Image (tube, grey):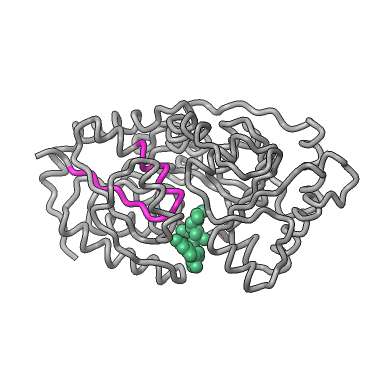
Amino acid sequence: MSLHILHVVGARPNFMKAAPVLRALGGAGFRQSVVHTGQHYDANMSDIFFRELEIPEPDVNLSVGSGSHAQQTARIMTAFESVVLERNPDLVMVYGDVNSTVAAALVCAKLQVPVAHVEAGLRANDRSMPEEINRLLTDQLSDLLFTPSEDADRNLQREGISAERIHLVGNVMIDTLVRLLPRARENKKNGFPAHYALVTLHRPSNVDDPEVLRRILSCMLSVSNNSGSNSKEKQLAVVFPVHPRTRQRIAQFGIATDGLHLCDPLSYLDFLALQAGATVVLTDSGGIQEETTFLGVPCLTLRANTERPVTVEIGTNVLIGNDTDRLRTELTKILDGKQKKGAIPPLWDGHAGERIARIVQEYFEKHEKEVKRAPKISA
Ligand code: UD1
């Protein structure tokens, strides 16, 4: 019987990371299953990504839905524990930094099932972000840590994680981008303006405080309405696919958005096409900082820090916090053609998934006997 690898995904940014790993491990002959925690459940936050990224239908959906951090994490742990006990996987793969990631890793660590963390080692050095707590804990609990860049390796070594657990493989999210960019360009969505800033916002630090959210959106509006002196700004539309959490906050705080092109969250291919054609991207997402760096599109990140410093050091990313004066200045620079030029970080080449598959094979060659011999403890 072939070795069984169980993948855990739950929220939108997990799907594009899992797709290339599933593909590569499938090609290497492993038996695989997919557990969807149900952290994201709207069709346009989840189902459409499975279709476009050609991820197999989940074998199990835990359907945990939304809740406070403790509620969501606890629900995932309780439901996932039964799945692990029943399916008895040889390795569990977790992705990124969402609540589903840490919840699954913690269950596995207690059941003594090996865990591999894809996108390990990223640190913003900011424990006010829930994702930072998820990153720190998941990395401590994981047996195999797959990192996207050298800074991640250094962070892990500093935290006392032994070198043989750390593997620099490159960026799996870029694997998906490289594979699907040609299709995204063909699919280019009609009805969007020709010259636009693409905006995404969902971090609590930007959208949960009415004053901060109001200020950011009114800055976007003033750019869109050309209240500034730069005449080129006049032509720049603002396209804003709105995350469900942000949509709720805009409604709750009664913030006007006339003049912005708001739309529902987009599919992977539609969003990638929009990114590739944008004059500038304004975001507080992690993955979008990486995608714009790969695409060479200027990115202004509405955060004070980033767990992806390579996008600032090598790529096109500029951190501006929520300082709207700085936002205006940086936008003007870009519109004047004075944007930061970037390069693509090493190993962001479309082959990270294959590197992971090779390392997993080697891991089993080394550990298979122990893995099979070790008694699994019951709950
Ligand atoms: C989560 C991740 C974040 C990631 C983001 C991408 C954590 C701690 N955060 O944040 O790192 O960047 O996903 O989107 O795991 N909602 C819906 N439909 C859905 C999903 C969510 O309406 O399909 C609404 C719910 O009201 C929910 C809110 O969005 O309460 C927030 O969802 P949640 O999963 O808690 O966190 P995100 O903000 O999406």
14 with respect to 115 (left or right): right
Q: Position of residue 263 (x, y in %)?
A: 59, 55
Q: Choose top left, top right, bottom left or bottom right for residue 296.
A: top right
Residue 276 in the image: above or below residue 139: above
- Look at the image and tell me whether residue 132 can be seen: no
User: Residue at (49%, 32%) from the top-left corner?
Assistant: 181
* Residue sitting at the far front: 191
Q: Position of residue 135 (x, y in %)?
A: 46, 51
Q: Choose top left, top right, bottom left or bottom right for residue 258.
A: bottom right
- Look at the image and tell me whether residue 267 can be seen: yes
User: Residue at (15%, 42%) from the top-left corner?
Assistant: 370
User: Residue at (36%, 43%) from the top-left corner?
Assistant: 18
Residue 8 in the image: above or below residue 53: below
Q: Quadrant of the N terminus?
A: top left
**Which region is colored magenta?**
4-20
Residue 311 in the image: above or below residue 79: above
Q: Position of residue 359 (x, y in %)?
A: 30, 31
256 with respect to 305 (left or right): right
161 with respect to 110 (left or right): right
Q: Position of residue 107 (x, y in %)?
A: 29, 59
Residue 370 in the image: above or below residue 314: below
- Whether the magenta-drawn stretch holds residue 16 is answered as yes
Q: Quadrant of the C terminus?
A: bottom left
